[in-house]
Amino acid sequence: MIFPLMLLLTISPLKAACTDPPAKGVIWLDCDLQGRDLRKVDLRGAVLTRSNLANADLRGAKLSRVDFSFVNLTGAKLQKVRLNSAIMVRANLTNTQLDGALLDKAKLGRAILTGAKLYQARLREASLYQADLTGADMRETQLQNANLNQAILDEVDLTGSNLAYANFKQASLEDAVLTNADLYKANLERANLLFVDLSNANMKEAYLVGAQITDAIFDGTQLEKALWVDRRRCNPGSVGECK
């Protein structure tokens, strides 16, 4: 019976204790790391599923490909941190500071980002399916080709952001600010655009079929070749209204 036991120990995955030092690929499951100072640590490829990192300081850390699924990152400091290809499914990022963070291709499906600070963050090709970004600061954010299908972006500030080719199908952007935003070829099918401010935005060739636009502001908005809510194709030179 010794041999089967040795074999079992050999093939069992390693599990690091919560007290183990930070390192590449470390496994911290269900760990309480609340308020921990983790500045400039290298955790690339680590697994932190269901851990508590509320108010933790991760500035300067390398967090590419880290699994933050179901992690509590409420109020954490992640400014300018590398989070490309990180998995943050259902993570709680309420009021988290992510200004200038690199989140290209990150998976944030159903994550909570209410009140999060994402000024000048990069989320190109990121997945934010059904994510809640209510009241987030996303000014000058790069969201090219990002998936925001059914996401909640009510009262979000996206001033000057690059949203080209982004998917906002059935998303809610009620009372959001998108002045001077680039929505070239963005998909806004059946999106809630009630009271949204799209002043001076680039919406050339955008898809707006079925979108709710009551009291939306289109002052100076470029709508050339956009597919309008009633399936009309806007004529070249359409500015402020679909002609």
Image (spheres, rainbow, N blue to C red):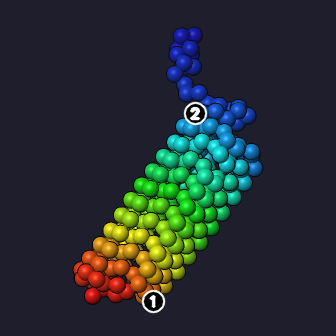
Percent coordinates x, y for residue 7 in the rendering: 52, 16
Amino acid type at image mark 2: Gly
Quadrant in the rendering for residue 230: bottom left
In this image, 127 relative to 235: left or right?
right
Give the Cα distance between marks 2 and 1.
Answer: 50 Å
- Residue sitting at the far top: 2
Q: Is residue 97 above or below residue 157?
A: above
Q: Secondary structure at mark 2?
A: loop
Dot 1 amino acid type = Asp
- The location of residue 30, given as percent across then percent down, is 65, 43
| Image quarter (top left, top right, bottom left or bottom right) of the C terminus | bottom left
Regarding residue 32, the answer to whether it shows in the image is no
Which element carries disc 1, helix, strand or loop?
Answer: loop
Position in image of residue 206 (x %, y %): 33, 73
Q: Is residue 191 left or right of residue 235?
A: right
* Image position of 236 with respect to 132: above or below: below
Residue density around tag 2, few if under 14, some if 14–19, many if 20 or more, within 10 Å? some
Q: Residue at x 36, y 79 (%)?
A: 222
Q: Earlier in the sequence, mark 2 or mark 1?
A: 2
Instruction: Report which quarter residue 145 is drawn in.
Output: bottom left
State if disc 1 and disc 2 touch (CB < 8 Å): no
Q: What's the mark number on residue 25?
A: 2
Check disc 1 and report the residue beneath it: 215
Question: Relative to 118, does residue 189 appear above or below in the rendering?
Answer: below
Of the pair 203 and 68, the residue shown nearer to us: 203
Crowding at dot 1, Cα within 10 Å, few <14 / some 14-19 / many 20+, comes out as few
74 relative position to 113: left or right: right
